[in-house]
Image (cartoon, rainbow, N blue to C red):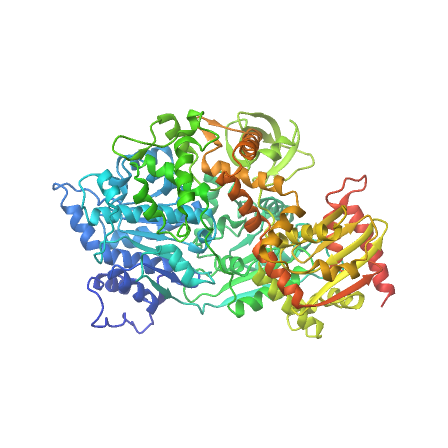
């Protein structure tokens, strides 16, 4: 990652330092000059603010030099004081203590960041040491770090929480002067970001105690609630991001409520971003989502051939596996120069791919979000995105993996997997040009994360409740935490709440004779440390050759569907399952057989509201016969057929279509609000339509719209205006919960909450529990709490998360408000339109039939195409 533009051939030197610049920056200027670079103004601004001891957020284009902007600022601000501290250690040549924590959201990014930090550190602070601590760190490296931490530690939120759970956490982390949070946008909007906020609050308290030692003991300092006020003594916190839409909120969430002088530095935003699309030779007028886009394989092969090195992004790991194998089958001569990368592969495999990309040995890597963030692959000159990126920020992020240096353009080529994604491609490019990036917001007071943090802090030296509450309320996530919720959390970690008092395993934290709350049971302490984190997924099964070589992990639910002898595709290989023992699937190479592809959770990303709005604008232009983009000209036959048989949805027009078939009475509605909102909306409309009697409806949905199918006669055209009424929020919440199987949905959310809060444990020391065991345990707690502790705050949280995340009621209300302001056009149909057809396919997936889904779709498409041609 380059720090700045190359110097001009005339030998341009760095710009002269203004008189007001803080002292200590001259060595940085000299070092930059020796590299032949000229610093950007935003980089100098960061150096100056860090020299003054300020915290901040740096928002700048991918590849513009954010990492070195903050890192050189850190070296300038800390080299003198930290260096002096190192020389005071009894005449021994000992590296300074842990001074800088660099937090990254992904393991691949952590390893790459460590490499980027090492070179300038070696030149400017040769006495410093650097290390990495993540889930990939070996036991030998961990043991060495347990003896002495490096001066600079690159880590993840989970590993930082583990460090905070050490009994000597105050001593080991109390000298940290700076925390850098890389790719802050990736963490800010989820529970990992909340975990990071809590960890930062703890580190600020440690720093405050060291800067103002008003009490002689940790217990006394906790009770004193020490807060430092001297400039330069407080913990500096800096965040890095390239794709954020709400910068002021992002800054406040990063630095906490009590850092009023934090600064927002806006860096380079004019980086050239080239977005184009591989256009199919023919466009389906009746497209259906769900296939993997392999019909575009010849064009993708040609695009890879034209590139020096490229990344081929997919949205799902199963899709990555299929595409990698398809590329190898199409070009066997590429064996060894194309690779596969996703988070379930073994660490050594991932590291080999990353190094091959950095060194330019790989022609292409088929990957998922495992390579989304910040990794510096200079040889990569092009990114291919298979299918829609589903969000503007994600598209920009992935595009930035190419041309990852100042002055170099980034290029991303979109590969549609069905015809309607051509509209998304054109819309995404327009949104990028307009600078429309999705906003992210911190979750509000998730108690499962707080409960876990309480046990972590109790292990890390203990806490006094009043002082810790003050610390926690300093975060944006918990600034509105009520006294009742705080008291409930304390009672929960002390004795499991009113319903678990009789069980010693839930007496996790108790006050000692000095008033500090600690974990008295070593067994419970070990169990907590093994399960720290907020990433919850299906239980993982290791995949290993009989000979011992490890390939990675797949979800337990996938392996459970296989029998010994079945073949499946994983790690780019066709494997045969031999047996499953102790959460390990033993395999060997398969010579033949129909291959299944592993499934992982989280494969279906919803369309963002920002991109959905841009899609509607493209459709509005098409409705006015304006087809400016090449993608829109390509998809024009489909859109014109939609207009001929019905209408095109636009920002001002809500389109509804009705159809009577042998199956019943269909309603197709196109709010373009994304899959999550459509789930709640479909349930709400079906519930309203059934009132005052009961009724049964089949539901299908995608990112563009939803289908309701009634077996009983229903006049959708007459009923629909009343069904779309916007109720007050309280009434809307009640209706949404009544319209769906809310208890079962809340039960599913509760499993995640139970795991994070420590009610159930995915891992015990020396043992991993199966997914079936975890589900049974979570369901048991759910039932017990419902019957005996209905006010349990984790149950309340499960219902809240169901509404705010899974059903997204806030956006549902916004969608209803927008729909009520639109002109409603109800179109009776004789046959499904291009927009209705994908919804029917979604519903067919849930049915069992002697006829395969692909055969049924092919038959329906042929019938519809004949009708379309006959109507011309």
Q: Quadrant of residue 220?
A: top left
Examine the rendering and report whether any part of residue 135 can be seen.
no
Coordinates of residue 48 in the picture (x, y in percent): 27, 64
Q: Quadrant of residue 650?
A: bottom right
Would you say 212 lies left or right of 557 here? left
Number of numbered discs on residues: 0
The quadrant of the picture occupied by the C terminus is bottom right
Can residue 843 be spotted in the picture? yes
Quarter holding the N terminus?
bottom left
Query: Where residue 649 sits: x, y (%)?
Result: 70, 66
624 or 815: nearer the viewer: 815
Q: Is residue 782 left or right of residue 680?
A: left
Extreme residue in the right direction: 870
Nearest to the observer: residue 275 or residue 515: 515
Q: Position of residue 19 (x, y in %)?
A: 20, 72
Which of the pair 48/360 is nearer the observer? 48
Kindly give the residue lying farthest to the left in the view shown.
91
Question: Residue at point 29% right, 58% down?
Answer: 72
Residue 805, given in percent of the width and then of the height, sits at 55, 50
> Vertical placement of 122 versus 527: above or below?
below
Residue shown at 63% from the left, 45% from the top = 322
Q: Is 263 on the left or on the right of 314, as rendered?
A: left
């Amino acid at each position: 990652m380059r720090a700045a533009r190359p110097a001009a051939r005339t030998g341009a030197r760095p710009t002269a330092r203004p008189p007001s610049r803080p002292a200590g920056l001259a060595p940085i200027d000299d070092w930059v000059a020796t590299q032949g670079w000229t610093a950007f103004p935003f980089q100098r601004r960061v150096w100056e603010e860090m020299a003054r001891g300020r915290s901040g957020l740096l928002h700048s284009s991918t590849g513009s030099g954010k990492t070195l902007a903050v890192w050189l600022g850190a070296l300038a601000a800390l080299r003198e004081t930290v260096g002096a501290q190192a020389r005071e250690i009894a005449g021994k040549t000992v590296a300074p203590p842990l001074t800088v924590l660099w937090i990254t959201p992904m393991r691949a990014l952590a390893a790459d960041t460590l490499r980027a930090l090492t070179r300038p550190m070696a030149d400017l602070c040769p006495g410093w040491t650097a290390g990495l601590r993540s889930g990939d760190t070996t036991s030998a490296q961990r043991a060495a770090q347990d003896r002495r931490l490096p001066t600079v530690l690159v880590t993840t939120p989970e590993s930082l929480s583990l460090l905070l759970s050490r009994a000597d956490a105050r001593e080991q982390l109390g000298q940290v002067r700076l925390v850098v949070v890389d790719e802050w946008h990736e963490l800010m909007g989820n529970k990992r970001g909340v975990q990071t906020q809590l960890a930062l609050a703890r580190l600020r308290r440690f720093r405050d105690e060291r800067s103002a030692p008003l009490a002689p003991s940790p217990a006394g300092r906790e009770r004193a609630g020490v807060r430092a006020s001297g400039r330069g003594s407080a913990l500096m916190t800096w965040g890095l991001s390239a794709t954020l839409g709400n910068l002021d909120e992002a800054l406040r969430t990063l630095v906490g409520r009590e850092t009023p002088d934090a600064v927002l530095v806006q860096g380079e935003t004019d980086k050239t971003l080239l977005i184009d699309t591989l256009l199919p030779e023919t466009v389906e007028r009746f497209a259906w989502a769900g296939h993997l886009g392999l019909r575009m394989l010849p064009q993708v092969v040609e695009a890879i051939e034209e590139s020096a090195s490229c990344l081929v992004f997919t949205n799902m790991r199963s899709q990555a596996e299929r595409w990698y194998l398809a590329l190898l089958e199409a070009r066997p001569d590429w064996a060894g120069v194309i690779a596969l990368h996703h988070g379930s592969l073994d660490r050594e495999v991932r590291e080999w791919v990353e190094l091959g990309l950095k060194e330019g040995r790989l022609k292409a890597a088929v990957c998922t979000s495992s390579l989304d963030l910040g990794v510096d692959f200079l040889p990569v000159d092009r990114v291919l995105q298979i299918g829609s990126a589903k969000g503007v920020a994600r598209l920009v992020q992935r595009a930035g993996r190419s041309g990852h240096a100042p002055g170099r353009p980034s290029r991303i080529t979109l590969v549609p997997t069905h015809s309607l994604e051509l509209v998304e491609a054109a819309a995404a490019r327009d949104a990028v040009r307009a600078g429309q990036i999705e906003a992210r917001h911190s979750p509000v007071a998730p108690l499962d994360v707080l409960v876990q943090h309480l046990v972590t802090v109790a292990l890390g030296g203990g806490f006094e409740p009043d002082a810790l509450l003050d610390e926690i309320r300093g975060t944006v996530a918990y600034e509105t935490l009520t006294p009742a919720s705080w008291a409930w959390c304390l009672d929960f970690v002390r004795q499991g709440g009113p319903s678990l008092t009789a069980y010693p395993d839930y007496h996790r934290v108790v006050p000692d004779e000095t008033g500090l709350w600690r974990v008295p049971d070593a067994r419970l302490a070990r169990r907590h440390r093994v399960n720290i984190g907020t990433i919850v997924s299906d239980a993982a099964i290791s995949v290993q050759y009989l000979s011992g070589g490890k390939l990675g992990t797949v979800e337990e639910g996938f392996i459970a569907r296989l029998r010994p002898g079945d073949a499946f595709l994983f790690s780019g290989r066709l494997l045969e399952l031999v047996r499953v023992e102790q959460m390990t699937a033993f395999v060997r190479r398969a010579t033949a057989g129909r291959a299944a592809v592993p499934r992982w959770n989280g494969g279906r990303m919803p369309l963002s509201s920002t991109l959905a709005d841009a899609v509607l604008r493209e459709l509005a232009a098409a409705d006015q016969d304006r087809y400016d983009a090449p993608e829109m000209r390509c998809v024009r036959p489909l859109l014109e057929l939609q207009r001929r048989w019905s209408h095109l949805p636009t920002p001002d027009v809500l389109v509804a279509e009705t159809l009577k078939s042998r199956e019943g009475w269909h309603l197709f509605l196109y709010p373009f609000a994304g899959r999550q909102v459509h789930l709640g909306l479909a349930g709400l409309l079906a519930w309203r339509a059934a009132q005052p009697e009961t009724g049964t409806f089949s539901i299908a949905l995608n990112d563009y719209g939803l289908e309701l199918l009634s077996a009983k006669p229903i006049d959708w055209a007459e009923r629909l205006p009343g069904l779309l009424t916007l109720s007050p929020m309280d009434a809307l919440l009640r209706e949404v919960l009544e319209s769906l199987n809310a208890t079962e949905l809340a039960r599913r959310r509760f499993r995640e909450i139970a795991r994070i809060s420590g009610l159930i444990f995915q891992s015990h020391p020396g043992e991993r529990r199966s997914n079936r065991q975890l589900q049974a345990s979570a369901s048991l707690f759910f039932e017990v709490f419902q019957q005996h502790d209905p006010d349990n705050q984790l149950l309340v949280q499960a219902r809240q998360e169901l509404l705010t995340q899974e059903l997204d009621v806030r956006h549902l209300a916004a969608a209803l408000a927008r729909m009520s302001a639109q002109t409603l056009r109800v179109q009776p149909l004789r046959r499904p339109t291009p927009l209705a057809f994908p919804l029917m396919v979604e519903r067919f997936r849930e049915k069992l039939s002697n006829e395969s889904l692909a055969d049924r779709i092919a038959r329906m498409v042929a019938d519809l195409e004949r009708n379309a041609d006959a109507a011309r």
